[in-house]
Amino acid sequence: MLKTGVVADRRYLKHFAGRAHPERPERAEVMIEMAESLTRPDLRFMAPREATQEEIASCHVAEYIATVARTASMDRFDFDPDTHSSRDSYQTAILAAGGVLTAAEAVMDGAIDNGFAIVRPPGHHALPNRAMGFCFFNNVAIVAKWLIEKRGLKRVMIVDWDVHHGNGSQDIFYESPEVLYASTHQFPEYPGTGSLHEIGYGAGLGFNVNAPMPAEFGDAEYMRVFDRLIMPIGRHFKPEFILVSCGFDAHYRDPLAQMRVTEAGFAAMARRMKRLAAECCGGKMVAALEGGYELEAIVESGRAVIDEFGRDADEPIRPDDGGDRVMPMIERAAQNVGRFWNLG
Ligand SMILES: [Zn+2]
């Protein structure tokens, strides 16, 4: 059994994005209740710390951070048509980045084997100078920077299986060979980025891997993408730490997107990432909640992933079967990034 840390804190309920907004406090509430109901003795609950200004500034420009900070004295501020703050949003966003940092620190220090951070607001759409898509600060990107700048790592892999493309994470590391960003997402969909042609730039060329898929693809297609693209590239890259942008909005019941992933599908992706982490970096891995807007779906998917994180990494991985219709996309991706990576 592996020791899994779960970051959970009811202060994550304080950010309020507006009435009838899908990114609502209940998302964190039901996830925390689910985690607290788990009876595994090896589960360790952790209270999040706040991210420091320096940590936030590793990914965001000072003027933008100050803009978000000023919203603490406003009942509401509209950053874009989807992204609104309340008085507690700035504090909650700092605690969200800090929550993922808390889990990553505990993994690095050996207190836990891997971690799952139940945080909100999410982060992967947040750009250096701009909030968008319900996101203010890029939680996972801030942790990747921290691992490199403060812990001296040279290779961090971000796997983003949120149904939306993490344009912010891609943007922040687009020219970096230290962070390999790999994303599965519905395409075309919000935010519009994430095409097969976006493969990084300069020193980062080849270190950005997008797997855009049309609506209605599900577990079989996702497994193909993981087994034929993400796992081989990961094995070649040999990350020293894996961060998962863990959205559950590719779930078949999610109201914001049209993919068909099940709870078992999310567990199967988690098993693959756990295997990759075991092979490359002693199992060091942290997943951070991103999207996912159907409460029962995120609870069941979250339970499946946290359970999977606790099981030994050498459990068998069933070979992918079905999913043939995703092969043309995988082949096109291989044409673009295959010259950088041995795809087997
Ligand atoms: Zn999403």
Image: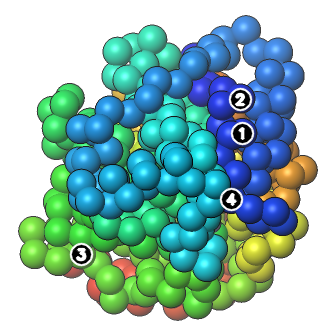
Amino acid carrying label 2: it is: Arg
Dot 3 or dot 1, earlier in sequence: 1
The one of 18 and 1 positioned closer to us in this rendering: 18
The numbered disc on residue 200 is 3
Q: Is residue 336 above or below residue 24?
A: below
Which residue position is annotated with label 2? 10
Quadrant of residue 45 within the rendered picture = top right
The one of 56 and 110 positioned closer to us in this rendering: 56
Identify the residue at horizontal 54%, vertical 76% (top origin). Answer: 80
Question: In whole angstroms, how far apart are the C-alphas of marks 4 and 1?
Answer: 11 Å
Viewer can see residue 148: yes
Dot 4 or dot 2, earlier in sequence: 2
Q: Is residue 192 above or below residue 151?
A: below
Q: Is residue 145 left or right of residue 111?
A: left
Quadrant of residue 119 within the rendered picture = top right
Mark 2 surroundings: few (<14), some (14-19) or many (≥20) residues within 10 A: some
Which residue position is annotated with label 1? 13
Which residue position is annotated with label 4? 17
Disc 1, disc 2: CB below 8 Å? yes
Residue 257 location (% of width, % of height): 74, 77
Dot 2 or dot 3, earlier in sequence: 2
Question: In whole angstroms, how far apart are the C-alphas of marks 4 and 3?
Answer: 33 Å
Residue 281 location (% of width, % of height): 33, 33
